Image (spheres, rainbow, N blue to C red):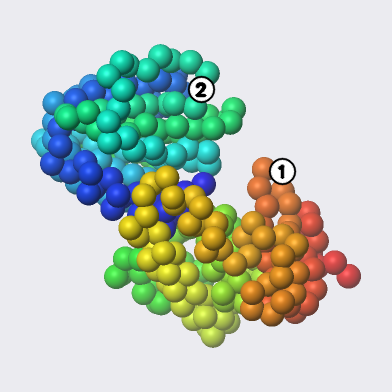
Amino acid sequence: MPELPEVEALVDFLAERAVGRTVERVLPLAVSVLKTYDPPLDAIEGRAVTAVRRHGKFLDLATDGGPHLVFHLARAGWLRWHDRLPDAPPRPGKGPLALRLRLAGGAGFDLTEAGTQKRLAVHCVHRPDDVPGVARLGPDPLAPEFTFDAFAALLAGERRQIKGVLRDQGVIAGIGNAYSDEILHAARTSPFKLAASLTPQETAVLYEAVGTTLRGAVERARGHAAGELKAEKKSGLRVHGRTGEPCPVCGDTVREVSYRDSSLQYCPTCQTGGKPLADRRLSRLLK
């Protein structure tokens, strides 16, 4: 799933190519992709793109005097840019193509989604916060107002595991499964540790890890074409997706906790005092 750093890079990539250009046609190809009906999707046609922004993991195309096209790529979605789209309109079918947006001059992009779980979501709205997922977002971790005091207040009284808190978009916007693993590894914190049990020193270390991990990933992603971002993300991860490989910090073997539809990775030496975590949902250490 694209997370804050990749979405930030997509914003830069798309802004450079789309801002100032007129939307010629928007064509949804998958029944499941469009989540709104008022205003209609064709309300953005004939309008110039004025800005591209990010709200957590959502991308937002603003048009001149008109609606916003807000979309979330979900787990298996992606944006594919074309300097020249085919002249013939695509045919709806069983392929990955979910939506095509054509700009004046012939360039544009496709939104695609692999797999059978169709979660890619496109909204045509008057304001970004008309999208429920945008309206419920917590603070952005790269915003100036995301201070240590603000972060500590978010964790105070949280009886959930810190991994889940970091991933909760209503608490902090933009962090997903991969970067929560990376942040916790950088902070040398167990993913199963209760957020409210962190000491002030541990909270300070974790706050620093949030900023350095995300800003470092944004810098690595910046300047890459959309088609290169997945590979760039994977190459920069130290523990996520690297089960069985040596930890780059201490050399211990990276381990995994598997869930029904996801998994987390961590280093026992760096994060859990050398003890492997139980590979099940219960937050217990193996004896």
Q: Position of residue 205 (x, y in %)?
A: 52, 80
Residue ID at (40%, 77%): 149
| Label 1, residues with CA under 10 Å away: few <14, some 14-19, many ≥20 | few
Give the farthest residue toward the right.
Answer: 287
Of 265 and 174, nearer the camera is 265
Name the residue carrying label 2: 95
Comparing labels 1 and 2, the label whose residue is closer to the camera = 2
Q: Looking at the image, can residue 152 be seen?
A: no
Instruction: For mark 2, give the secondary structure.
Output: loop
Q: Position of residue 196 (x, y in %)?
A: 58, 71
Residue ID at (80%, 61%): 278
Relative to 64, does residue 41 appear above or below in the rendering? above
Name the residue carrying label 1: 260
Instruction: For mark 1, give the secondary structure.
Output: loop
Residue ID at (44%, 19%): 31
Q: Position of residue 132 (x, y in %)?
A: 38, 40
